[in-house]
Structures are given as C-alpha cells and as structure tokens.
C-alpha cells in the first residue's frame, strides 16, 4: 500500500528501460519502494535498468517481457504480473516513441506505429492493469503524457495527437475509477533533455528526467490528478491553447 506519507512500496513500470522512468525509480527505491517490476522489450537497456534497481537496494527487482503494441497479450501480461508479485501500489506508464515527423508524414505505416505505441497500445495496457488495480481496491496509475498533446503543432502533430488521445483517455479512465480506491496521475512534461530528444535543440522551459522524477514523486504523495513539468507550463499552455490558428500555425519546430 502507499503509506501514510504517500510512498509506494511496489511499482510496475510499463516501458521499464525509459530514461525518465529510471530517474523516478532511482528516487522511489531509497524511499522504501522495495518491489520493482520493469516491463519492457527484452534487451541490454532493460537488463541494465534491472541491475540499477538491484544496486539501489530493492528487495525484488525483476523484468517482465512486455510489448506495448502487442494488445493481444495485455490482459495475460497484467494477470501474470499481479498474480506473481501481489498488490502493486503504482503502475508507471512510460512506454512511448517520439517518431520522426517528416518520415511519419510521408509513411502512414510509420505514423501508425507512433499512434499504436503511444495511444492504442498504451490505452489497452492501462485498461488491463486498471482492472487489476480496481480489483485490489487501491493503487495509482501514473501516465507520462506530454504538453505536446495539449494542442497539436504543425512540426510534431503525429506525436502530439497520439499524446492528446492518451491524455483524454487517461482523464476518462480517472473519472471511471472514482470511488474505487484507484487514482490516476497524468504527467505533462515539456521538452525533456535526454535520450528521446537527443540531437534536438531544447525548447523553451525544457527540463530534465530528474526534475520530472521529483514532480512525479511529489504527485504520487499528494495524489495529484495532473502534474506539469516544469509547473509554469500549466499557465503557458493555458494561453497557447487559445492562440488564434494563424498564430499557432507559425510556431517553430
Ligand atoms: N523525453 C521527452 O522530451 C518527453 C517529454 C514528454 C513526455 N515524454 C514521454 O515520457 C515517456 C518516457 O520517455 P523517455 O524520455 O524516458 O524516453 P525513452 O528513454 O526513449 O523511453 C521510452 C520507453 O518506451 C519504450 N518502448 C517503446 N516502444 C515500446 C514497445 N513497443 N513496447 C514496450 N516498450 C516500448 C522504450 O523501450 P526500449 O528500450 O525497448 O526502446 C523505452 O523504455 C514517453 O511516453 C514519452 O513520450 C517524454
């Protein structure tokens, strides 16, 4: 159970090798999160992530094979994890791809993979784990959305719209879980300097995986519904959402 001061003792990460997820795990494990299950595509990144969790002192640090695009197996995956590890306090949803807007615009199949990964697949997996969280009667889903989903921008509308879909889905799921003991925290970071954005020029108000992790840990403790990182982006996007289309269209890449 999440303890009286908001610290989870068990964590399942969907997208266990994510850089942001690893920054979050690095803060939760020393704060008494003793069971960490990293679900993801098998490979060196996932193996190294598990090794880091073990080194940080978790009692249980294990990986489970998980492909977010494999919707046929999401329910079996969720059942396997909850049956094997018992109650899970927090499910962190970190799987996602940025894609390449120019490539994806010219190749509908490549674009579909971005949609499937970031929206359809993630939503399917969230429904599978939400069912198990509802059954156990407590817990929190923390989903890494993005400010890119607040309003689709010409320069990255494929990624942006996939995150809009995920964000809207997560809001609805949160409402449907009201009264079950299960909460949802939607995290909307801006540009995070790291692996996913490597080689790109940082956007204004850019942030770091560590800052996202601090905000997520605080959001879990307070049971926040929505977390912006950095917080000022809540107000920046309150304005951005209402800019005239003719102005919005000119926003730089
Ligand atoms: N970085 C940013 O600027 C930023 C800003 C806002 C929101 N976000 C969101 O934050 C989340 C984490 O991003 P990050 O910065 O930590 O990037 P990252 O290090 O590239 O992490 C992405 C994760 O998604 C996993 N993944 C991709 N396709 C998958 C699939 N088919 N099945 C299972 N896992 C899959 C990757 O696994 P592999 O190791 O197997 O590839 C990796 O664990 C993403 O949802 C991203 O959209 C990022």
Image (spheres, rainbow, N blue to C red):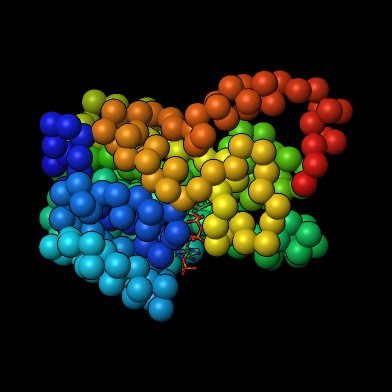
Q: How many marks?
A: 0
Position of residue 43 relative to residue 39, above or below, is below
Looking at the picture, tell me which residue is in the foreground, 245 or 190.
Answer: 190
Looking at the picture, tell me which residue is in the foreground, 50 or 171.
Answer: 50
Q: Position of residue 44 (x, y in %)?
A: 41, 78
Q: Position of residue 161 (x, y in %)?
A: 64, 44
Q: Position of residue 97 (x, y in %)?
A: 56, 59
Q: Who's the residue at 57% across and 52% down the image?
A: 193
Q: Position of residue 8 (x, y in %)?
A: 20, 44
Q: Who's the residue at 55% across and 57% down the image?
A: 194
Position of residue 129 relative to residue 41, above or below, is above
Q: Who's the residue at 21% across and 34% down the image?
A: 6
* 131 relative position to 15: left or right: left
Q: Does residue 125 appear in the picture of this structure?
A: no
* 75 relative position to 89: left or right: right
Q: Does residue 243 appear in the picture of this structure?
A: yes
Q: Quadrant of the N terminus?
A: top left
Q: Who's the residue at 23% across and 68% down the image?
A: 55
| Image-quadrant location for residue 207 | top right
| Image-quadrant location for residue 35 | bottom left
Position of residue 177 relative to residue 106, above or below, is above
Q: Residue furthest bottom?
A: 44
């Amino acid at each position: 159970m999440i303890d009286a001061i908001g610290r989870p003792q068990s964590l399942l990460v969907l997208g266990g090798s994510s850089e942001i997820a690893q920054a979050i795990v690095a803060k939760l494990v020393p704060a008494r999160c003793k069971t960490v299950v990293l679900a993801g595509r098998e490979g060196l990144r996932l193996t190294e992530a598990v090794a880091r969790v073990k080194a940080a002192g978790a009692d249980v640090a294990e990986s489970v094979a998980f492909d977010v695009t494999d919707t046929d197996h999401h329910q079996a995956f969720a059942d396997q994890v909850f049956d094997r590890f018992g109650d899970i306090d927090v499910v962190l949803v970190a799987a996602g791809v940025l894609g390449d807007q120019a490539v994806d615009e010219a190749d509908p199949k490549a674009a579909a993979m971005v949609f499937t990964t970031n929206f359809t697949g993630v939503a399917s997996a969230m429904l599978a784990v939400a069912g198990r969280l509802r059954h156990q009667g407590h817990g929190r889903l923390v989903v890494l959305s993005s400010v890119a989903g607040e309003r689709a921008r010409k320069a990255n509308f494929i990624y942006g719209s996939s995150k809009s879909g995920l964000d809207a889905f997560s809001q609805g799921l949160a409402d449907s879980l009201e009264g079950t003991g299960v909460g949802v925290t939607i995290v909307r970071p801006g540009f995070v300097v790291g692996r996913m954005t490597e080689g790109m020029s940082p956007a204004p108000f850019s942030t770091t995986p560590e800052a996202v992790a601090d905000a997520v840990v605080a959001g879990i403790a307070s049971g926040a519904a929505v977390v912006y990182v950095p917080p000022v982006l809540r107000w920046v996007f309150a304005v951005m959402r209402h800019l005239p289309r003719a102005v919005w269209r000119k926003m730089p890449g």
